[in-house]
Image (cartoon, rainbow, N blue to C red):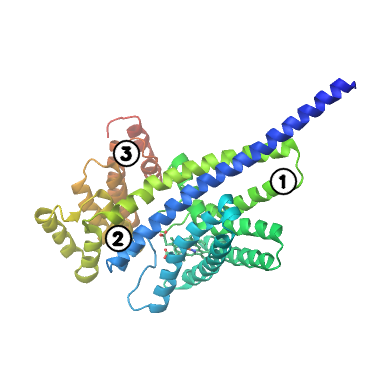
Amino acid sequence: MSTTMSTAVLSNRLELNSVAETALKASARFWFAVVLLGQLAFAFTVASFYGVTALHGNMHAWNKILSQGYVSGKTFTNSALIGHILFATVISIAGALQLIPHVRAHFPAFHRWNGRLYLLAAFTQGITGFYLTFAGKGLPGSTLLHIAIWISAGLIIFCAAMALRYALARDFRTHRRWALRLFLVASGSWTFRVGFSLTVLLFGPIGFDAPTFGGPLPVFWSFAEYLLPLAVLELYFFAQDRPTAMRRLATAGLLFVLTLGMGAGIFAVAAAQWIPTVRAAYDGRKSIGDTLSATIASAGIDKAAQQYHELKATQPAVYNFDERELNDLGYQLLRKNQFKEAIRVFQLNVEAYPQSSNVYDSLGEAYMDDGQNGKAVTNYRKSLKLNPKNHNAERMLQKLGAPELASSLYIGGPI
Ligand code: HEM
């Protein structure tokens, strides 16, 4: 090879190496910016919903979201739950701040104290989370899902202990690596929500049963929430330790694509859950769902239905009568196997929103859970007619043995 040629090859190689390094750094920054945004949005939602309801002394509203929830008189379990939720907000904010390089470099004392707070939050989340899975009448979902959650608690505690150990030993390179692993496993609960919502956005509501949280999709994400980010992190370390241009470019590309997916998942979960939850938290109106829930518990569903009609006629501006209110209440009842009550609540919603495909879908599900398959079919058909893209209704009709009807409706045929 001539000297001119070898110089050209060398300079190309150097250029490629520098492009690869820039690409890897840029994709890591892009990942971090998206994570930061998503974690802060999650923290704000958790603080808004649980904080505002607690300020109003309405902790029972938590049971809209939680399966076991706040139970009057169970002081120890309630304290564990409050600690868990408080530190869910702390860990999301502290973790995000901890990774900002500028903060680390210019405010070392803050980094140290924030790091201690983060470690405390990690241990608290692992321990209280572990306890909450055993407290009360048990979590929804399969045994495999529970195993995945316990592994995540163990990993959080283990990574926190390792990060602490290497910080105390002043081995900051190893500390940084364990701290990053900790950040990823401790973000698992958040990653689960984002990944789950991304899958539903891409493929529709398949692979899970809403009231019981059974099915393969929750199990998949309960393992993937930490295994996937940890695997990508190890690839990132590998590309840093044994750098070749190709390795760095491949890792940068993978990280970039996964971050785009993560961004779409954040968008999906924010649109479907976080934004409506925050809106409801700061809505000055009273929740009709909470009001009826208390009446169902104390006086039964007939009284609650009567109360609903009365309040709607006399105080329409005082109460929040949005579609989501009764839909959430209906699912809350389904989770407690109160099928008759759930059916009645969904019927009220169908009366109020006769043009919504979703309310018929929910009513169909309640009838199906109650074993009234004929009525389930009728409601899924109505839902599909109002929204021919409701693939869930189509699948349920197939499950209920009315597939030919589903497909004829799907192309707009007569009932
Ligand atoms: C470290 C990060 C974690 C965060 C940020 C977090 C966040 C939360 C939040 C916000 C809730 C309230 C439910 C909701 O609003 O969706 C919750 C509930 C819960 N979490 Fe965690 N969590 C974490 C770790 C864990 C771990 C490691 C476990 C299990 C070992 C766990 C088990 C639970 C349980 C059992 C509930 C109650 C669920 C229910 O009653 O439906 N969490 N968590």
Reply above or below: 373 against 161. above
Q: Whole-percent x and y of residue 88?
A: 46, 62
Q: CA distance from mark 3 to mark 2?
A: 22 Å
Q: Mark 3 and 2 residues: CB-CB less than 8 Å, in contact? A: no
Reply above or below: 354 against 336. above
Discs 1/3, front? 1
Residue 266 visible to an observer of this rendering: yes
Q: Whole-percent x and y of residue 394?
A: 38, 40
Viewer-side residue, 200 vs 319: 319
Q: Which residue is mark 2?
A: 339
Discs 1/2, front? 1
Q: Quadrant of residue 392?
A: top left
Q: Is residue 281 left or right of residue 316?
A: right
Residue 226 visible to an observer of this rendering: no
Is the CB of the residue bearing disc 2 within 8 angstroms of ligand 1? Answer: no
Q: Which residue is mark 3?
A: 384
| Disc on res. 411 | none
Which is nearer the N-term, disc 1 or disc 2? 1
**Label 2: element kind:** helix
> Which quadrant of the rendered structure holds the C terminus?
top left
Reply above or below: 256 against 51. above
Q: Whole-percent x and y of residue 41?
A: 42, 51
Viewer-side residue, 35 vs 329: 35
**Label 1: element kind:** helix
**Label 3: element kind:** helix
Q: Is residue 4 left or right of residue 284?
A: right
Q: Whole-percent x and y of residue 200?
A: 45, 44
